[in-house]
Image: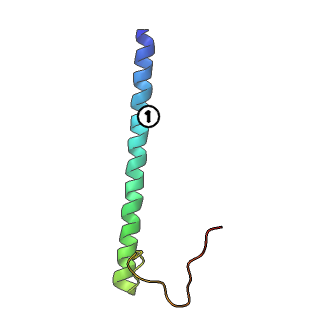
Amino acid sequence: MKESSSQKLKDLEAKVEDLERSVGQKQIYIDYLEKMMEIAKDDLGIDVKKNYSTQLSAGLEKTKKR
């Protein structure tokens, strides 16, 4: 029984390590995308972040869900 508990603990520790690595990689990707949006805004004058308070232009209509 002791070996079983030890093996479970090792497996869980390995899983935690893997998940922490995955979260770290995702955070790097998020930081990268945020920096790219900042560069696009500063250098090109393009604001790529979605602004939920703006209204649709006259030519666009909301699509109906089927």
Report the amino acid beneath label 1.
Answer: Lys
Q: Is residue 45 above or below residue 52?
A: below
- The structure residue drawn at horizontal position 40% and vertical position 17%, both measured from the top left corner, is 6
Residue 60, horizontal then vertical, whole percent: 55, 85
- The structure residue drawn at horizontal position 42% and vertical position 29%, both measured from the top left corner, is 12
Determine whether the residue tagged by mark 1 lies in a helix, strand or loop: helix
Residue 37, horizontal then vertical, whole percent: 39, 74
Total marks in image: 1
How many C-alpha atoms fall within 10 Å of the one at disc 1: few (<14), some, or many (≥20)? few
Query: How is the protein colored in the picture?
Result: rainbow
Q: In which quarter of the image is residue 39?
A: bottom left
Q: Is residue 61 above or below residue 25?
A: below
Say left or right for 42 vs 7: left
Residue 29, horizontal then vertical, whole percent: 42, 60
Say left or right for 2 vs 63: left
Q: In which quarter of the image is the N terminus?
A: top left
Query: Residue at label 1?
Result: 15
Q: In which quarter of the image is residue 7?
A: top left
- The structure residue drawn at horizontal position 61% and vertical position 68%, both measured from the top left corner, is 65
Q: In this view, does 17 lie above or below 57?
A: above
Q: Quadrant of residue 53?
A: bottom left
Residue 19, horizontal then vertical, whole percent: 42, 41
> Hey, which residue is sitting farthest bottom in the picture?
58
